[in-house]
Image (cartoon, grey):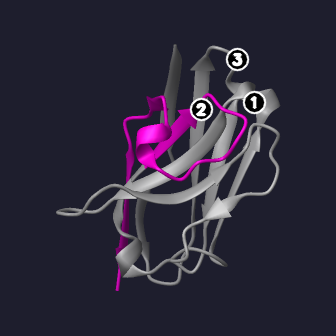
Amino acid sequence: QVRLVESGGGVVQAGGSLRLSCAASGRIVSTYAMGWFRQAPGKEREFVAAISWRGGRPYYADSVTGRFTISRDNAKNTAYLQMNSLKPEDTAVYYCAADYTTVVRTTADSYDYWGQGTQVTVSS
């Protein structure tokens, strides 16, 4: 079993930055790929970013490429999502997820464990 706890959400003005953290506990989390997803009101959950357990090449949704950066620190069992140049359309609940695989996947159904989510609100 893996437990994920997100933090770092909040309210920020457009153009601002936030850094989300995802603290993991339980099984050997360093062997899991980690992903970030988001869900806005009335919309489906969508992929944001993912990184392999080795911390290799990250993957991003087109909508956040160049603005968001995913990283992980396996020694701290923590994944991060640095969000810069935030836009009102980035407003959503952000979830981190763990996928017990050596490949990086971008579909929510592929992930085995989920956090409870953290709200990010970007005002215009």
Residue 107 at what x, y percent from top left? 47, 50
Residue 21 higher or lower than 48, as above or below: above
Q: How many marks?
A: 3
Residue 93 at what x, y percent from top left? 35, 54
Is there CB contact under 8 Å for labels 2 and 1? yes
Disc 2 to disc 1, C-alpha distance: 8 Å
In the picture, residue 32 is in which quadrant? Answer: top right
Q: Amino acid at mark 3?
A: Ile
Q: Amino acid at mark 2?
A: Ala
Q: Earlier in the sequence, mark 3 or mark 1?
A: 3
Residue 116 visible in the picture: yes
Q: Earlier in the sequence, mark 2 or mark 1?
A: 2
Q: Which residue is mark 3?
A: 28
In the picture, residue 116 is in which quadrant? Answer: top left
Is there CB contact under 8 Å for labels 2 and 3? no
Report the residue at 59% width, 32% height from top.
Answer: 23
- Viewer-proximal residue among 105 and 62: 105
Disc 2 to disc 3, C-alpha distance: 13 Å
Residue 36 at what x, y percent from top left? 52, 51
In the picture, residue 24 is in which quadrant? Answer: top right
Q: Which residues are magenta?
A: 95-124
Q: In the image, which disc is placed on residue 76?
A: 1
Report the residue at 40% width, 47% height from top.
Answer: 118
The answer to whether residue 82 is left or right of residue 55 is left
Q: Amino acid at mark 1?
A: Lys
Q: Earlier in the sequence, mark 2 or mark 3?
A: 2
Residue 122 higher or lower than 3, as above or below: below
Q: Residues within 10 Å of mark 3 (few under 14, many from 20)?
A: few
Residue 8 visible in the picture: no
In the image, residue 54 lies in the stretch drawn in magenta: no
